[in-house]
Amino acid sequence: MKRFFLFILICVGNFQFADAQLLWKITASGMDKPSYLLGTHYLVPMVYLDSVKGLANAFNECDAVVSEVIANNIDASTLLRKVAFIQGGQTLKDLISEEDYPLADKALKSELKIGLKELSKMYPTFILRLYEIELFKKLTGIYDDAQTDSYFQLAALQKDKKIIALETVEQQVQLSLDQNDLQSRANQLTKALLNRDSLSNELIKIGKLYKGGNINDFALLAKIRTQADVALNGISTIEMRNSEWLKKLPDYIKAQSCFITVNIEHLAGENGLINGLKQAGYKVKAVE
């Protein structure tokens, strides 16, 4: 459970990454050293990154690691334990229809060995993410639990590099845990549990797109997966976060060379970080 909460904060075989576009070099006139932008994903274990060209040199070259949130944070984990559950008297049984509940419960137990009753007060998005991770492991045969964001932060600590968070845990929680959107999140969980084959195909596609570093197709897939956010807020959480991060990144890059790790969904597209940095005057080029 502790490992699960650490994973939320960051919230198959040995592949070769020919022509991958996971790692990007950021330069500009007046910069003494380049910074780098790495696309990660919550499903992706560290073994995925073994063959990314220039990754180790890029990391060692930089003075600071910039991540979405600081994962190795006791206070953050404590906060998450307080907010990761459904508020008030409702449970998942109130949010899932009587017809769907036993089917969803059986599907969850098949992967997690634990059912809806035991997780009845947990926020649906957390359960869905955990379910996706376990299903992805089964589909790929890779059971490495080392996550990319937390790995680079731990490596930064060992090398006395500065660690910078793009947002606070409170900010990420507000975006991910909207109690007013509880029914919609429960519906998403139910749909995933009752459509294992469809979700499996989607997860396999995510793995293939990541393997190929295909950030443009990843952006299209992310747009589909965040349609519920757009319908509720008029804008996806990815775009909202990108807009805020692009206000901060220039100052971080100016102060020191940065190794920036964010979910790959944030990289591409008109409102992605790569295009945003280019519009801000930086040259952003894939490391080949």
Image (spheres, rainbow, N blue to C red):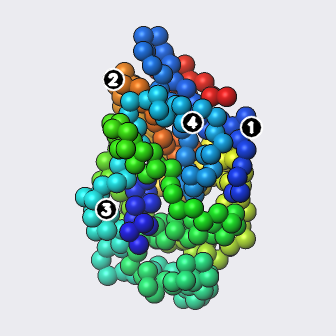
| Relative to 196, residue 32 above or below | above
Q: Are marks 2 and 3 in contact (CB under 8 Å)?
A: no
Please name which of the two marks, 3 or 4, marks the residue nearer to the observer: 4
Image location (x, y in percent) of residue 151 = 46, 50
Residue displayed at 69% across by 57% down: 12
**In-front residue for pair 267/222:** 267
Query: How would you rate the neighbour count of disc 4 (Cα within 10 Å): few for under 14, some for 14-19, many for 20 or more?
Result: some
Disc 3: which residue:
77
Tell me which label, 4 or 2, sits earlier in the chain: 4
Rounded to the nearest whole Å, what is the CA distance between mark 2 and mark 3? 29 Å
Disc 4 marks a residue whose amino acid type is: Leu
Q: Is residue 42 left or right of residue 91?
A: right
The residue tagged with tag 4: helix, strand or loop? Answer: helix
Residue type, mark 2 in image: Ala
Tell me the distance, in whole angstroms, between the alpha carbons under discs 1 and 4: 14 Å
Residue 74: quarter of image: bottom left
Cβ atoms at labels 4 and 2 below 8 Å apart: no
Residue most extreme to the top = 30
Q: How dense is the environment of label 1, judged by Cα within 10 Å: few (below 14), some, or many (20 and up)?
A: few
Say which element carries label 1. Answer: loop
**Can residue 95 be seen here?**
yes
Residue 185: percent from the left, percent from the top? 49, 67
The mark that comes first in sequence, 1 or 4, is 1
User: Disc number at residue 55?
Assistant: 4
Three-letter amino acid code at the position of disc 3: Ser
- Per the image, label 2 sits on a secondary structure element best described as helix
Residue at left offset 25%, top offset 58%: 75
CA gap between label 3 and label 1 equals 37 Å
Q: Label 1: which residue?
A: 18
